[in-house]
Image (spheres, helix red, strand yellow):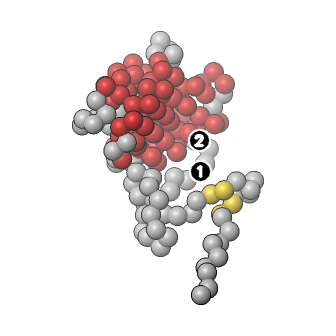
């Protein structure tokens, strides 16, 4: 009997593990060879571009992908805005958990995200609807099993 030896893990230029498996619209790994959905392109974005792209993903019910855009922005943001972008990424992760049926994860991560972005409510940088997002997040955390619409990232 021969055993199949697992192939080496995919690595990026810095040696960090990457998962090349295809994913569904909520970021769940699919079997190798499945179609999956397109991955988020890693690139530098302006805050306006990041917010617009993340909103497109949210509107398409792809909060995992929105999270990837927002997380990338968080890692590139200047220090005064890092907690804001991190909180926005957490809100998208919380929605991902909610859509996947993980109520506990939805409550935990969404609450942390709301706490992070709430500090920016008075200044609402980049036209972000901080107050509306905090209300949305608190509503999701209160009823994670209910129907939750996707949030609007910007003031309308």
Q: Residue furthest right?
A: 14
Q: Which residue is mark 2?
A: 72
Residue 88 place in picture, x, y as percent = 48, 31
Q: Residue furthest bottom?
A: 1
Q: Is residue 18 left or right of residue 154?
A: right
In the rendered image, which quarter contains the N terminus? bottom right
Residue 113 place in picture, x, y as percent = 48, 28
> Is disc 1 surrounded by few (<14), some (14 to 19) or many (20+) residues within 10 Å?
few
Quadrant in the rendering for residue 155:
top left
User: For the point 61% across and 27% down, which residue is it?
Assistant: 82
Q: Residue furthest front?
A: 1
Look at the picture and state if 29 lies above or below 73. Answer: below
Residue 58 place in picture, x, y as percent = 38, 42
Residue 54 place in picture, x, y as percent = 45, 41
Q: Which residue is mark 1?
A: 42
Marks 2 & 1, CB-CB < 8 Å contact: yes
Q: Identify the secondary structure beneath mark 2.
A: helix
Q: Identify the secondary structure beneath mark 1.
A: loop
Which of pointers 2 and 1 lies earlier in the amino acid sequence? 1
3D distance between C-alphas at marks 2 and 1: 8 Å
Q: Is residue 143 left or right of residue 129?
A: left
In the rendered image, which quarter contains the C terminus? top left
Look at the picture and state if 125 lies above or below 72. Answer: above
User: For the point 66% across and 56% down, which residue is it?
Assistant: 17
> Is disc 2 surrounded by few (<14), some (14 to 19) or many (20+) residues within 10 Å?
some
Task: Name the mark on residue 100.
Answer: none
Can you see residue 49? Answer: no
User: For the point 43% across and 26% down, which residue is it?
Assistant: 111
Look at the picture and state if 91 lies above or below 96. Answer: above
Q: Residue furthest top?
A: 122
User: For the point 45% across and 52% down, which residue is it?
Assistant: 27
Q: Nearer the viewer, residue 131 or 106?
A: 106
């Amino acid at each position: 009997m021969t055993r199949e030896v697992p192939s080496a893990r995919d690595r990026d230029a810095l040696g960090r593990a990457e998962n090349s498996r295809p994913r569904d619209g909520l970021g769940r790994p699919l079997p190798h060879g499945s179609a999956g959905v397109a991955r988020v392109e890693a690139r530098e974005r302006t805050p306006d571009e990041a917010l617009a792209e993340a909103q497109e993903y949210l509107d398409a019910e792809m909060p995992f992908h929105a999270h990837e855009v927002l997380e990338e922005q968080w890692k590139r943001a200047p220090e005064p805005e890092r907690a804001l972008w991190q909180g926005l990424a957490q809100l998208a992760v919380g929605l991902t958990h909610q859509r996947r049926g993980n109520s506990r994860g939805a409550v935990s991560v969404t609450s942390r995200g709301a706490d992070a972005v709430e500090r920016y409510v008075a200044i609402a940088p980049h036209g972000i609807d901080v107050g509306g997002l905090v209300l949305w997040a608190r509503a999701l955390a209160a009823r994670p099993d209910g129907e939750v619409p996707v949030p609007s990232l910007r003031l309308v």
